[in-house]
Amino acid sequence: MSVRIATFNVENLMNRFDYSGFRNNLNKDRTLQLFQIQDEGQYRQLEQARTIAHADDTRQLTALAIAETHSDILCLQEVDNIGALNAFEFGYLFKMVGEGYRYKYMVEGNDSRGIDVAVLMRETTRYGEPIEFVQMTSHAHVTYNDFGIHNPELALLGIEPHERIFQRDCLEIDVRIGGKPLTLFVSHFKSMGSPRNGLDGRASTMPVRVAEAMAVRRIIEDKFAHNGGSADKRWVICGDFNDYRERIVIGGDSLAGYTFDPVSEPVSSIDILLEGGFCENLVERRPVMDRWTLYHTRGPQERHLCQLDYILASPALARSNTDAVPDIIRRGQPHRTIFPPKQKVELFPRTGWDRPKASDHCPVAVTLNMV
């Protein structure tokens, strides 16, 4: 008996227009920056046209990437609302996989842009075992005070103890697979922002992600505290954690040839979750050069590949699935992505140099035996 689980940041699955670029140039799409726009009314018309024209190819590619995961349970990040999810599933994903993900679960979280985490499930696994929903719990309301994890580093960022820990949520969903319990914890940690207080974007926002990781671990520990502890239970933590333990720094160019140098990071919020064998990062079962789920670039001087998307398995699941190695679906990446030697894949049709693409992230999927 097994279940296939995937996680995927679908990059702004929205069903509304964002007009903030009219007043904030940082939010204005680069296409519209090419043109002289007379007033806000004209800007709104052009933004609507641009968004609609761009969305169809993008969501076809997103659906293709999801279909290639062959997942029974799909954990998503950056979903606007249940309406957007229903429209995407019916208009795009249904054409790829048929009557697949009929059950959808999400709760409005804390993100200022309104992007949330969500879970889609089939009625049965591909082998016919029933997938039974038991309950859903949101932890979006939890504050630093609630868990006693406020500290001076957070205070320097202007974060106060009464504020909520999760930038989005830690959505907890209990299911049964063929009658056997499994708990999903789905989250989307604080993104790496701009440099601040003399630190780069990753370092300056690290205290927030560390707090989120501490909170996820606390939620899991509390959940199983009165039932023998978490180590012997079946659970997974899935999502985009916006942090990495290692990265592959890319040098060179297409004329001289590219170089790929793996670099370990001394500090990562992911370490909080892995510390003491609390859980296992299943993607680390892949070779070090082949764990990346995102290509990052700010031009030739700053390029790397890294893992931002995770399926972390409880010790019990990791022990009973020693041969389970996750798949990373990279066919939805844009043509600008620089692949290490022998990793290049055939990209989905109509993929562009930068866009359209399935997402800036790659889906991660793994099959786990429920023994």
Image (cartoon, grey):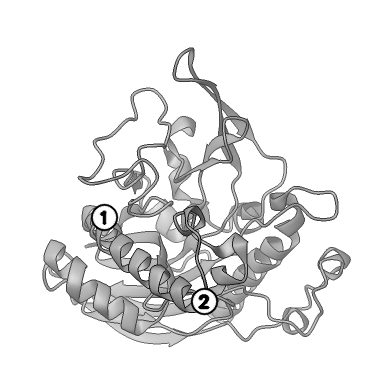
Please tell me how crowded label 2 is: few (under 14), some (14-19), or many (20+) other residues with Cα within 10 Å. few
Residue 318's place in the image compared with 188, above or below, is above
From the top left corner, tell me how far across and down residue 306 is, in percent. 52, 42
Q: Secondary structure at mark 1?
A: helix
Query: Tag 2's secondary structure?
Result: helix
In the image, is 38 to the left or to the right of 271? left
Residue type at mark 1 is Leu
Q: Earlier in the sequence, mark 2 or mark 1?
A: 2
Q: Work out whether residue 298 or residue 123 is closer to the camera in this orientation and state it.
A: 298
- Which residue corresponds to mark 1? 61
Q: Relative to residue 350, is residue 237 depicted above or below? A: below
- Left or right, 168 with reference to 336: right
Q: Residue 252 at x, y = what percent? A: 54, 19
Q: Give the number of the mark in front: 2 or 1.
A: 2
The part of the image, by quadrant, that contains residue 291 is top left
Residue 16, percent across and down? Answer: 40, 79
Front-lying residue, 202 or 239: 202
Q: Residues within 10 Å of mark 1 (few under 14, many from 20)?
A: many
Residue at 49% across / 12% down in the picture?
256
**Cα–Cα gap, marks 2 and 1:** 31 Å
**Residue at the disc numbered 2:** 40
Q: Nearer the viewer, residue 37 or 206?
A: 37
For the point 44% across and 19% down, the residue is: 254
Horizontal relation, residue 277 to residue 331: left or right = right
Residue located at (55% from left, 36% from top): 304
Is any part of residue 181 visible from this angle? no
Furthest residue toward top: 256
Q: Residue drawn at (22%, 52%), measured in percent from left and top?
A: 68
